[in-house]
Amino acid sequence: MIPRSDAEVPAFTEALGLPGLADLHVHFLPDSVQRKVWAYFDEASAHYGTEWPVHYRLPVDERLTVLRDLGVRHFAPLVYPHKPDMATWLNEWVRDFVAGVPEAVPTATFFPEPGVGQYVKEALDQGVRCVKAHVQIGGYDPRDPLLDDVWGQLAEAGVPVVAHCGNGPIPGKHTGLDIFEDVLREHPRLVAVLAHAGLPDHAFAIDLAERYPGVHLDTTMVGVPFNRADELLPTDWPARLAGIADKVALGTDFPSIPYDYATQLRAIATWANADDRLGDDFLRTVLWDTPRRLLALR
Ligand SMILES: [Zn+2]
């Protein structure tokens, strides 16, 4: 089955024999930051050239209820700084947040700034399971020498870093998978989850996943009508996914998406149905096994 609405999502996962969903790419932010993010999306026409009506603009407790009703059993609440002197505050905030939300795994973020190696070390020591690097919003060069030790620590720890390093939805100063590949060359064992499957360079993202053992893709906003799936995805997308089927993890960008959660699941189900090598096994891997493996959940 394919879920036509959020209400049908629990039946969809149950039909697959799954206890629910594990979402590697969700955002929760301090209220003051969340308000600014939503204000930015309200001006989306100016920034992205298109309207971006945030579908789940709700208070935190109601957003958590939505996730629970969808059957999201585990999620990584990702935070990210757009300037220096912000990451440690966000990391403290998210630590408090996950303490009260059993489905949320501890995460952290960073920025190229003095002390970054130390606070990333502390976060890893505290058991962080997932780290966010927002190269586009942060406007930094992922090859910044200040980050060399950070990538090294993450590679050593095997903790996944969800990296928004592609040129979509709009390029940043130092975005581009070619730039990020320089980091991978230096740290070839890095467990890097290319956010949005490298949007818009999806074919390059698959190349990287084929060539580097730790490179994965997340599904966030990929293949949805809003993101011009027909134009952006390579025509052989499902066939190429078959070669890296265990390196694709559910991500959604909940709550700041301009459509409902089921829309993302429909896109993934469409790929699964488009190639005999994918099918329900692929769905189970993407929606549950791989994100759980990455988040070290048992
Ligand atoms: Zn995101």
Image (tube, helix red, strand yellow):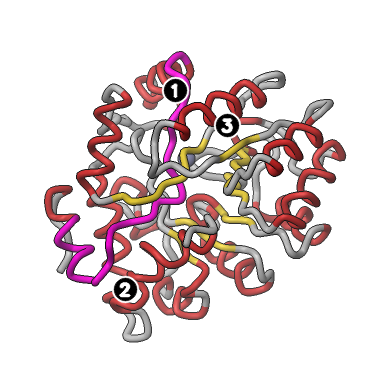
State the residue position of label 3.
80
Q: Horizontal placement of 296 versus 264: left or right?
A: right
Q: Is residue 255 magenta?
A: no
Tell me whether circle 1 and circle 3 mark residues in contact (CB < 8 Å).
no
Does 120 sit left or right of 90 as displayed? right
Residue holding disc 2: 272
Determine the residue positioned at 71% across, 42% down.
Answer: 125
Horizontally, residue 194 falls left or right of residue 240, namely: right
In three-dimensional space, the C-alpha distance between marks 1 and 3, rounded to whole angstroms, equals 11 Å
- Circles 1, 2 touching at the beta carbon (< 8 Å): no
Of residues 55 and 65, the one nearer the viewer is 65
Task: Identify the residue at horizontal 32%, vertical 86% (top origin).
Answer: 276
First reached walking from the N terminus: tag 2 or tag 3: 3
Residue 166 visible, this angle: no
Instruction: Give x and y (percent) for residue 295.
Output: 52, 55
Quarter occupied by residue 285 = bottom left
Q: Position of residue 94 (x, y in %)?
A: 52, 30
Whether residue 261 can be seen here: yes
Q: Quadrant of residue 88?
A: top right
Residue at x-position 30% and y-position 30%: 54
Task: Give the magenta-colored segment's residue range.
Answer: 10-32
Between circles 2 and 3, the one closer to the viewer is: 3
Q: CA distance from mark 2 to mark 3?
A: 31 Å
Residue 84 in the image, given as x and y percentages of width and height: 71, 21
Q: Nearer the viewer, mark 1 or mark 3?
A: 3
Dot 3 amino acid type: Tyr
Q: Is mark 3 within 8 Å of ligand 1?
A: yes
In this view of the protein, which residue sits in the foreground, 49 or 73?
73
Residue labelled with disc 1: 37
Residue 269 to residue 187: above or below: below
Q: Amino acid at mark 2?
A: Ala
The tag earlier along the polypeptide, 1 or 2, is 1
